[in-house]
Image (cartoon, rainbow, N blue to C red):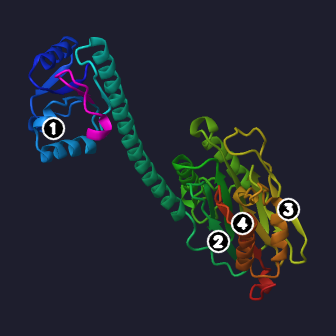
Amino acid sequence: MPGKILLARKSNQTGDRLYRMLREKGYFILKSGDLPETVRMLDERPDLLLFDTEISHELSPEHWTSMVLRCRDNPLPCLLFSSNGRNPVPIEALTPWVADTLRHPIDEREVQYKIATQLTIHRLQYEANLAQRMLLTKQTELEEYRRSAALVQRALLPEHLPAVENLEFAWSFLPCDKIGGDLFNIIHLTDDTIMIYLLDVSGHGVSAGMVTVSVFQSLSPTSGRLFKTVPKAGGKPQCLSPAAVLRQLDREYPFERFGMFFTITYMLLHTPSGRLQFSSAGHPPPVRIRQDGSFSFLTSGGSIIGAGGTVPFDEGEITLQHGDRIFLYSDGIIEHCDSQGNMFGLQRLYRKLLLQKKRSLPAACDKTIEALHCFGLENPFKDDVTLLGVEYRDPKHASTHP
């Protein structure tokens, strides 16, 4: 639609003819005949100022200074013209904020072209500024959502690990600068069985964080989903096997519903005997490091959660020996890159863990993460980094470290 134009002009033949021309073209015209009135009418927020330089010859410097400040601080396109047939005063000398001049203010083609150009520029600038303000508002809101989601994610990390005489736990967690999807937990399911899991939701941001929260709730012992049929009064609850838990998660979190997937390693550890049942859904395989320095991978499992069970979940079982260590980790470790783009990788991780076998479990985790920092030369982490260690001691040696 036509814009609002403030026409500041001397009342003479040229000024009046310009006014009529603009009215005939459908513009809404605000008229002023002197500078003080022009300054006051700027409060009407016109889209364009047409300013007759003949007015400026009759005014004091302070009036002109006020005019310049108003137009400079409140950007408004301005076209200069002279109603007495003279060329307007040069733009740079009088008004550096002026967009252009009308050399022939009664030439309809020139007037129409230059007014249409300045109104278009003004409209586009307004829309750009509005879009930028809206974007800044959205960014502020999103950052607040991300901050809140990150706080929730951190709150889900275990504050206290189970106190079991013949077990030791240690972990290192380094969040990336985005909201990631790493989560782990170690908790008693029954008096003699401990659940251990580490999961990694694909992607980053609020959506990944919310899926992480949802899975945490699904894997809560109070959800009732981790046990077989509730036993009769006085009976001992029976835990669902790792493979059964993964099948259940795969049904609950289809990709079609959530638009993302996650990987997970889920374990059950029988504390008196050291019997460890495990299954992984597309997650990097945990590593078992024995006291003698040998190691093996716990590779049983199936496809990622969300793939609809395209690869069935199988299950492994081992019996831990005195001094055995089990390490779970997220791909944020093995995919961390140095300045040349080389990844830390599985083999380097295993070697670092083997080198730390004489250290305490917490020190072994800390030193491995330290090696990761050194490898990356302080490159920022693009994903969460999680390393979780479990050390088993035979109950007969529970009071003695290996």
Quadrant position of residue 284? bottom right
Amino acid under label 1? Asp
Which quadrant of the rendered structure holds the C terminus?
Answer: bottom right
Tell us which disc is closer to us: 2 or 3.
Answer: 3
- Marks 4 and 3, how far apart in space? 19 Å
Residue 21: x and y in percent read: 19, 13
Estimate the spatial distance between the alpha carbons at disc 2 and disc 1, rounded to whole Å: 77 Å
Q: Residue at x 33, y 34 (%)?
A: 126
Which callout, 4 or 3, points to the residue nearer the camera?
4
**The disc labelled 3 sits on which kind of residue?**
Gln
The amino acid marked with disc number 4 is: Leu
Asked whether residue 84 is drawn in magenta, I would say yes
Magenta range is 79-95
* Residue at image mark 1: 43
Quadrant (top left, top right, bottom left, bottom right) of the N terminus: top left
Q: Residues within 10 Å of mark 2 (few under 14, many from 20)?
A: few
**Residue type marked 2:** Asp
Labels 3, 1: front one: 1
Residue of label 3? 347
Q: Is residue 178 visible?
A: yes
* Viewer-nearest residue: 59 or 112: 59
Residue 240 drawn at (x, y percent)? 68, 55
As drawn, 236 above or below 360: above
Q: Tell me the residue that label 2 is attached to.
A: 191
Compared to residue 99, the image places residue 68 above or below, namely below
Determine which quarter of the picture holds residue 180.
bottom right
